[in-house]
Image (spheres, rainbow, N blue to C red):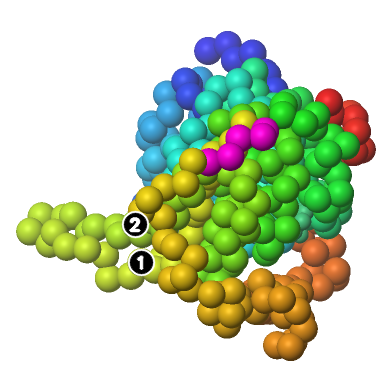
Amino acid sequence: MSEPIIDQGAPSPSGPLGYGDRVKLTGPKGRLNTITLVPGGEFHSHRGVIPHADLVGIPDASVVVNSSGEEYLALRPLLSDFVMSMPRGAAIVYPKDAAQILSLADVFPGARVVEAGVGSGALSLHLLRAIGPDGELFSFERREEFADIARGNAAAFSGRVPENWTVTVGDLQEVLPATCEAGSVDRVVLDMLAPWECVDVAAEALRPGGVLICYVATVTQLSRTAEQLQRSGLFTHPQSSETMVRGWHVEGLAVRPDHRMVAHTGFLITARRLAPGTVLPSLKRRASKSEFSDEDLASWLPDLGPDGGAATGGAGWAPEDVGERSKSDKILRKKVREAQRFAEERGADTAAPDDVAEPGSGD
Ligand SMILES: C[S@@+](CC[C@H](N)C(=O)[O-])C[C@H]1O[C@@H](n2cnc3c(N)ncnc32)[C@H](O)[C@@H]1O
């Protein structure tokens, strides 16, 4: 049998397995190993060997036999498998929430999307897939180390850093206006501690009718964001939700919900950008001002009070305030090395298409 043509390019999402593809091998005892097919590579277990060449050219979801005659099921990992196993610097958006984000924000092929922060790049991978090669993703991240981890993960997933993705290091409020022209963006996706601080720049970047979606971990962040959207007068149709997915065990007569589930990840709030200068007609059913006072609101959201929260300890929000652990520089540097190794083991090119985008280079 002639050796298949060796193409070490981008891994393919479907079709027969080829070099560069990641493959999950499930062995006789149900143990899982994920490998990347490389020319001359071999998968070794303590009982035998499978040359990578034996996997190249066979259909996805086939059974292969090792040198001791043991059978292994070979299956390409899905995007959701990949994001759950890749190195993480910050908490990732779980696949269940990423799916909702794509749907609620109506992310479409060819869309120009802004995302902040990048964190480990899990949501970036979902957004890149949804916008396709004709779309553009402009991602922003305050911390260089997170940007590096995300780039490593994207390269490991796609074989290289996608050309339609720019990662700009900086605070979204400062760098977005210099990167994307006003009114040029279809969707803005915020996954950060204080999205309310970015409502104005997001509004400036969005086209009329464009969607802003924010993912937040706590109810206090959710209501702070909702209040800022309403106060800005720049958005309409705010909608909030959370997504609970309960897996089921379905086997013979044992058909029941799983005993364990991920009970909480975060909340989503979406809103549509009004055309500049548009003032919403007042709705009769809207809560009247007399139903709650600024003082009532400030007791729930102190930083909305007249003193900006000074009386209750200041308006600044820190990761610890919402129960997040902040990562030390040392841990992050370790994660960057892990992500780069992860990409290199897969023969991926981690260089950005034009290296790191500087503010102002995008549009
Ligand atoms: C939870 S992580 C994002 C995770 C990411 N969505 C994922 O799925 O992997 C939040 C990130 O937002 C970044 N961040 C917070 N505020 C920011 C801002 N104003 N501008 C840019 N990045 C910001 C943080 O540094 C952090 O890396």
Badge 2 density bin: few <14, some 14–19, many ≥20, Cα 10 Å: few
Residue 62 in view here:
yes
- Looking at the image, residue 84 sits to the left or right of residue 165; the answer is left
Residue 245, labelled with which disc?
Answer: 2
Residue 116 x %, y %: 71, 48
> Label 2 is placed on what type of residue?
Val
- The structure residue drawn at horizontal position 62% and vertical position 31%, both measured from the top left corner, is 275
| Residue at x 77%, y 83% (from the top left corner) | 310
Above or below, comparing residue 248 to residue 74 in the picture: below
Q: Is residue 181 magenta?
A: no
Q: Helix, strand, or loop for circle 1?
A: loop
Q: Residue 333 sits in which quadrant? A: bottom right
Which residue type does callout 1 highlight?
Met
Answer with left or right where residue 328 lies relative to residue 121: right
**Residue 47's spot in the image, x, y percent?**
49, 53
Q: Which picture quadrant has residue 328?
A: bottom right
Q: Mark 1 or 2 closer to N-term?
A: 2
Which quarter of the rendering shows the C terminus?
Answer: top right
Give the residue at mark 1: 261
Label 1 beta carbon within 8 A of ligand 1: no
Q: Which sits in the foreground, 107 or 158?
A: 107
Q: Which residues are magenta?
A: 276-280
What separation in Å lies between label 1 and label 2 (alpha carbons)?
Answer: 8 Å
Rendered location of residue 21, percent (x, y): 59, 31
What residue is at 65 percent from the left and 51 percent from the top? 232
Assess whether mark 2 and mark 1 are in contact (beta carbons under 8 angstroms).
Answer: yes
- In which of the image's four quarters is ligand 1 placed? bottom right
Quadrant of the rendered image containing residue 206: top right
Is 141 located above or below residue 56 in the figure?
Answer: below
